[in-house]
Amino acid sequence: MATSTDLPTGRRFDEVIFTRLASAAKASDSTEQAGLYLEAAHVVGQAHFKPHLQAHARMLRLPWRTGILPSLHYIPGKGGPTGPNGVP
């Protein structure tokens, strides 16, 4: 039985589409739109190690590029970051 995580045999990577999506994300004036392009690039590249890694790297760089960084707070004794209301 096939599941949504099963990949077709011999699935080829479409470098042209991946590059267009990544370029559109970089050129986008909207952070939300850039994120959507990167999600699409992630889907195109997820079955292939290098493009998958590149998509994740671009998604992680997006907040730095746009200046929108998540707020993390450290609570002593809890051992890790939490959100604005102290919720992990």
Image (tube, rainbow, N blue to C red):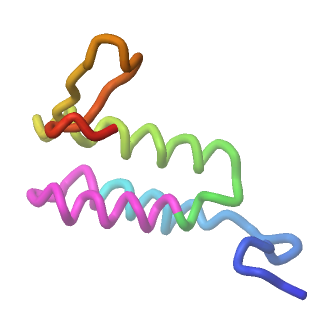
**Count the marks: how many?**
0
Compared across the picture, whether 50 is left or right of 64 comes to right
The residue located at (86%, 70%) in the rendering is 10
In the picture, residue 62 is in which quadrant? Answer: top left
In the picture, residue 85 is in which quadrant? Answer: top left
Residue 31 included in the magenta stretch of the image: yes
Q: Quadrant of the N terminus?
A: bottom right
Q: Residue 34, percent across and down?
A: 24, 58
The residue located at (16%, 55%) in the rendering is 31
Q: Residue 9, percent across and down?
A: 88, 74
User: Relative to the observer, which residue lies in front, 8 or 75?
Assistant: 75
User: Relative to the observer, which residue lies in front, 1 or 79?
Assistant: 79
| Most frequent secondary structure within the magenta stretch | helix
Compared across the picture, whether 12 is left or right of 38 comes to right
Residue 41 included in the magenta stretch of the image: yes
Q: Residue 2, percent across and down?
A: 84, 85
User: Relative to the observer, which residue lies in front, 47 or 80?
Assistant: 80
Looking at this view, name the residue that lies furthest to the bottom.
Answer: 1
**As drawn, 56 above or below 67:** below
The residue located at (25%, 50%) in the rendering is 26
Q: Quadrant of the C terminus?
A: top left
Q: Which residues are magenta?
A: 24-42
In the picture, residue 87 is in which quadrant? Answer: top left
The residue located at (32%, 26%) in the rendering is 81
Q: Residue 47, percent across and down?
A: 70, 60
Compared across the picture, whether 71 is left or right of 37 comes to left
**As drawn, 85 above or below 24:** above
Looking at this view, name the residue that lies furthest to the front.
Answer: 77
Compared across the picture, whether 40 is left or right of 53 comes to left
